[in-house]
Structures are given as C-alpha cells and as structure tokens.
Amino acid sequence: MTGTVFLQQLMNGVSLGSLYALLAIGYTLVYGILGLINFAHSDVFMLGTYFAFFMMVIFMLPWWLSIIIGVALCALVGVSIERVAYRPLRNAPRISALITAVGVSFFIENLGLVTVGARPKGFPRPPLMKNIYMLAGARIQGVTFWVPLISVAILILLFYIVYKTKMGMAMRAVAKDLETTRLMGVNVDKVIMYTFALGSALAGAGGIMWAFKYPQINPLMGVFPGWKAFTAAVVGGIGNVVGAMMGGFIIGISEIMIVAFFPHLSGYRDAFVFTILIIFLLVKPGGIMGEAQREKV
Amino acid sequence: MERDTRINLFLTFCLFGLLLLGIWLAENNLNSYLIRVFNTACIYIVAASAYNLINGITGQFSLGPNAFMAIGGYTVALLMLPVAQKQQVYFLKPLIWPFSAFSFPPYLFVAALFIGGLLAALFALLIGVPTLRLRGDYLAIATFGFGEIVVVLANNLIPLTNGALGIKGIPEYTNLWWTAGWAFWTVFVIKSLVNSSYGRALKAIREDEIAAEAMGVNLFRSKLMAFAISGFFAGVAGGLFVTLISTVSPTLFTFTMTFNLLIIIVLGGLGSITGSTITAVIFAFMQELLREVEAPHTIGPWTFPGIPGMRMVVFAALLVVLMIFYRRGLFGSRELSWQMVIDWLKGRRRA
C-alpha cells in the first residue's frame, strides 16, 4: 500500500468517523441523562436524509435551506418521540423503556417502508460536494474533504453548548443526578427535551452528510450506522461527549482500514464492529473515557 | 388442596385429550392454509415461551433469539436436505465436506431437530459466558450484535449457507403433530422449570440481582442455564420453521423475527408462559388477518389500494401503546390456572 493510497484511506476513515461521532453524541447525551438506549436515534438519522431529500426534490428548495429544514424537522421528531413514548415511562422499569425504544425504532422503519418503499433513492449532491481536490498528490472528492470539516465545526459548536451555556450546564447536572437537579429548581423536563432536540438535530445533520457521501437512501439505512455509532459511544465511554467523539473516529478509521487491508473480508464488515463492541464490553465496559460505575444497593 | 390438585389434573388431562382430538380433526379436515397458520402458531409458542424464559422470567433483556433460531434452522436444513438436492442448490460454491456427503433419512427428523437445538444451546453458552456478565441494556446490545453477526455470516459463508440465495427444497416433514407436540413439550418443560427451585432463583434474579446473590443464588450459572435452555428451544423452533416452509434464507431470521417474539411475550405478559402460549396463537392469526388489510379492497365504487408492510407498523405501534398504557400485558406475570378460569366463570354467572 503506497503512501498516497494510505492517505486517501485515512481521509475516508476520518470522514466516516466524524459521521459516527455526530451520531454517537446523540446516543451518549440521551444515555447520560435518562440511562436509556434510544434505539430510535438511528431512525432519526434516516429521517433527516428523507426530509432533506423531499425539500430538494419535491419542493425544489436550495440545498442549504433543505439541510436546515431537515435538521430542524429532526429536532422536532426527536422531541416528539421523547414526549410521546419515553416521558410516560420515565419511572417505569428499565426493561419497559427499552422495549418501547425498540418499538419506536421499528415503527419508524416500517412506516418508512410503507410510505416511501424499500427501493433506494438517489440523493442529489450539491456541486460543492462533487468537486475534486488535489491534496499531496491524492485526488480527493469534495465530500471527503467537506464532510469531516463541517462535522468538526458542528462538534465545536456542540462543545460550546454543552460546556459554556447555561442549558449545557443544566444538561450535565441532570446527567449527574436528576432528582437533585430537580430540587435545585431546574425544569428537568425542559432540559431533557432540549437534549433530545440537540441529539436529534445532530443525527439529522449526520444523516444528510452521510447521504452526500453515500448518495443512496432507503428506510433501513440508519440501522448499521446507528449500531456502529452506538458502539462508538460505548467504546468512548457512554455518557461522555468527548469519549463519543473519540470512539466515532476510532470505529470509523478502523472500519475503513480493515476493509482496505483485507479486501476479501469486506463482506464481514458489519460483523467486525459488533465483535469490537463485545470485546470492549468485556474488557473495559466503562469505555476509554468512562468512569468505573459502582452498582447501588 | 388435595382435591383441588386432583380436579386440576383431571381438567388438564381433559384439555390434553381435547387437543389431541383437535389436532386429529384438524389434520384431516382443515384446508392446508389453516393448518399452516396453526403450525406457525405452534412454532411461535415454542419460540416465544423459550424467549419469555430469559426475558420475562429471568429478566435479562436479550435481543438475540433470531440468532438461535437461525442456527437451529440452518442445521436442520443441512442435515435433512437430500444429497442430490444439495448438489443442485449449491451452484455458486459447493457445500463443504461433512454435509455434502450425507443426509438424514426422514425417521431421523427428530434427531435433526435435537441436534439443531443443541447446537443453538451451545452457541447460547458461548455467547452467554462473556455477555451475561453485562447488565440490562448492555446485554441487549451484545445479543443484538450477535444476532446481526449471525445474519452477516449466513449471507457470507456461502459454502455452508449458500449465501443470500438460501437453501430451497427442504423436505416438508413438519405437520401439526410435530409442531403441537413440540409446543406442548416446550411449555411443559419451561413451566416445570419455572415452578422448580431453579425457577424461583431465576425470578429472584429478575426482581433484584444483588438481593438474589446475597441469598445464595449463583447469578452467573442460573442466567447461563436459562439462556442455554432458551437457546435450545429457539433452535428447535427454527428447525421446525424451516421444515414447515421448506426453505431457509438469511432474511427469514433477521431482527423482525425477534421483534415478533417480543410482541408476543409483551402482549401475553412478561413472565407468563401461558400468556405467551395464548398470544402466540392470537399473533399467528392476527398476522393473517392483517394480511387482509394489506391486500387491495374494493368496497362499492371505491378501491382502496393495499399497503404491503402495514402489519409491522401496526405491531410496532401496538408494542409502544402496550408499554405505555398496559404494561402488564394479558396476564401480567401470572399464569393462567384452572382456578382463574373457574373464578372467571363464577364471576360471569353471578354478574
């Protein structure tokens, strides 16, 4: 493998990793606050691409406006899911909440299959994403260049929100201890709503950029990216935003490298990540950035 | 008490006799479509009660029964498929050695089912040893991951599974006697297990792991045992399913299968084996009834286009609504007993 090819693969890995990172942060935020795996998160990711697709193809809106509307609609969907399905179960046993999350995910996927059909649709790419750039002798397509750049910009914005704003502080407080935060006079419901909006918006943005990268969209497209991003969140230490980002890059780069170095194993690509997941859960269930958790008696 | 037990036993035998008569009548009189629905119902009973043992009784949220069903299904398919048929099916790449050389004669069908079940149980042990140390949600993801790995392997291990094309022409050995027999046997075994001291240990784990451990329950061994038994019956269900529809392919055992079983055990009440049994039958028929909704209809001057796939939307919505408004399901964690039936009848008469 020559240096140029390696550089190209690394760029691919970073760009895939940044998308996993965007998606992983949504999982981690919700898990940090509610202790719930939001199975429907990967479907919000899928919905984002369809919203943007319809805006561009049916309503003929310019691509940047379509993206903004798509992301906003995703935030709305995230908040509605929380309101309708998760809030009534906030004090219910864990298993009920988990089953509900699986149900919501399955509902969105199948509703998608019924309404838009299982056939993949081509996603239009704006010219910005199609341009070819030359970098150190490697031909790099616009998407490979812009997708990680935009993702990193979004990540910086997110870190600003989580660590510098008042709402971010409230989110971190709720994650630490929901009841005490409520006693301190924080409107916990509002914070949770905000978290879902933020996470879902990130998922939507991630989905749209995913569609720029792999311009084929279908109602089940979120399943594998979702699980890989979840793995990334676990690898990084679930509940930890920095960890989710690191995990995203680790999973993205290693996935690309495995396929690049062992092309004959590419059919097993999706199985690798689950193997990583199971190994990580066994060796270091807290993840890289996670704190060791003690069980309360 | 003594008298009650005798009455219960008598009623159970009567019900059993009625069931035998029912199967005999059904096999001889019903059309093949209805028989097929009943067969499917019985297979769901096997798979759902097995799934309920781990999810409802032991309280370990597993999302992997589809993987165990797939292992059982493929094993039975490979064992029962005639050699000539094997050469015909595997045209992409020839089938690997031990399986390509032999196939079981029809009278060894039950042995094939057992082997399929045992293999699934073995995999349950293998995957259980590492993952059952994990708590709640982590177990869910790990088992889901295992399920997906099995589907990916079924798609890619072409010399063994024939890839995405699947295996066709598996002899249709399954009939109502087989499926109903296995359904009865499964419910009997799992019920006996649940009522034994092991079963009480499993329920203790569900209620509070730490307290159970403090009372001397070996958490890991108990969970592993429940997981393996659950895996065994899931494997058998997979084998029955494959010989019922005479074909196996990776799409048969995707997450949708797990989802169906989840619906059944939630609807029946997590932890109620009789609940799973009854809802398995309801579910099999509901699936067929909703198929009717999916077909295009003409009522008077209007034609309604059918919406294929609507079933799963309805089921998913049903699951969410059940969880929010009626978490207990039909029976909660109670079992349907004769006493309940008698009380219910008395209540009805008085009213």
Image (cartoon, rainbow, N blue to C red):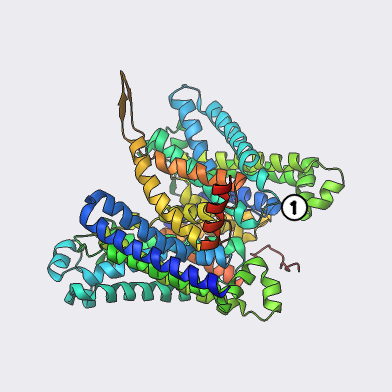
Residue B94 shows in this picture: yes
Q: Nearer the viewer, residue B210 or B272?
A: B272
Image quarter (top left, top right, bottom left or bottom right) of the N terminus of chain A: bottom left
How many other residues sit within 10 Å of disc 1, few (<14), some (14-19) or many (≥20)?
some
Residue A217 shows in this picture: no
Residue A284 picture quarter: bottom right
Q: Which residue is mark 1?
A: A175
Check the image and report above or below for B62 versus A28.
below
Image quarter (top left, top right, bottom left or bottom right) of the C terminus of chain A: bottom right
Residue B198 picture quarter: bottom right
Q: Secondary structure at mark 1?
A: helix
Where is residue B340? Give x, y as percent.
55, 58
Q: Is residue A191 left or right of residue A146?
A: right
Q: Nearer the viewer, residue B92 or A20?
A: B92
Where is residue A101? Give x, y as percent.
57, 49
Dot 1: chain letter: A
Dot 1 amino acid type = Ala
Where is residue A12? Give x, y as percent.
47, 51
